[in-house]
Image: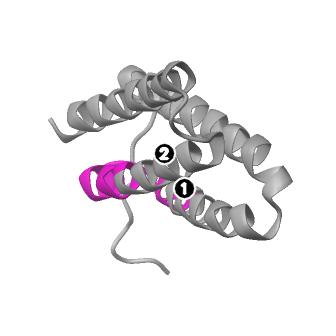
Amino acid sequence: MKEKLNTSLQSISLVAVAGLAAWSVFSGDMSSKEMLSHLILFLILVEILSLILVYKSYPESHTTYKMAIIAIFMILLGIKRMMPDFFVPLTVTAFAVNYLYNFYTNQKRRKGMFKRKKQDKYKL
């Protein structure tokens, strides 16, 4: 159940990113940097919720990767002020990498190949 909710959460975030981007383009009220900043904050929230939902059933590598994505999104907010010319391309690249990984893990989970390994209690 939690994994299906996680998949729905990731799909909602993709729809929200596409919807806000389309709304920004057609309305012209917001600059692209402001829009991407709002999207980054939204995706940080989504990724944290996603980690809370599936951290026990997905492998440790998935948790580590998601924590790195959250850190990258936070760093991007700093890049916005320090190097504004690089902000938009780096943000679009981070979004693309995040969504490719999300759909990759969802496909692996559906096939049953993406599970946490059971640890042995006693190791010699």
Q: Is residue 33 above or below residue 124?
A: above
Q: Label 2 to label 1, Cα distance in Å?
A: 25 Å
The image shows residue 17 at horizontal and vertical percentages of 47, 32
Q: Is residue 14 above or below residue 42?
A: above
Task: Give the residue type that dot 1 points to.
Answer: Ser
- Please tell me whether the stretch drawn in magenta is mainly helix, strand or loop: helix
Residue drawn at (36%, 49%) of the image = 46
Between 85 and 13, the one nearer to me in the picture: 85
Mark 1 surroundings within 10 Å by alpha-carbon count, few (fewer than 14), some (14 through 19), many (20 or more): few
Identify the disc placed on residue 61: 1
Q: Is residue 12 above or below residue 95?
A: above
Q: Nearer the viewer, mark 2 or mark 1?
A: 2
Which residue does the numbered mark 2 point to in the structure image?
A: 39
Magenta segment range? 46-65
Between 91 and 28, the one nearer to me in the picture: 28
Residue drawn at (47%, 58%) of the image = 63
Identify the disc placed on residue 92: none
Most extreme residue toward the left, as rendered? 1
Task: Give the residue type that dot 2 points to.
Answer: Leu
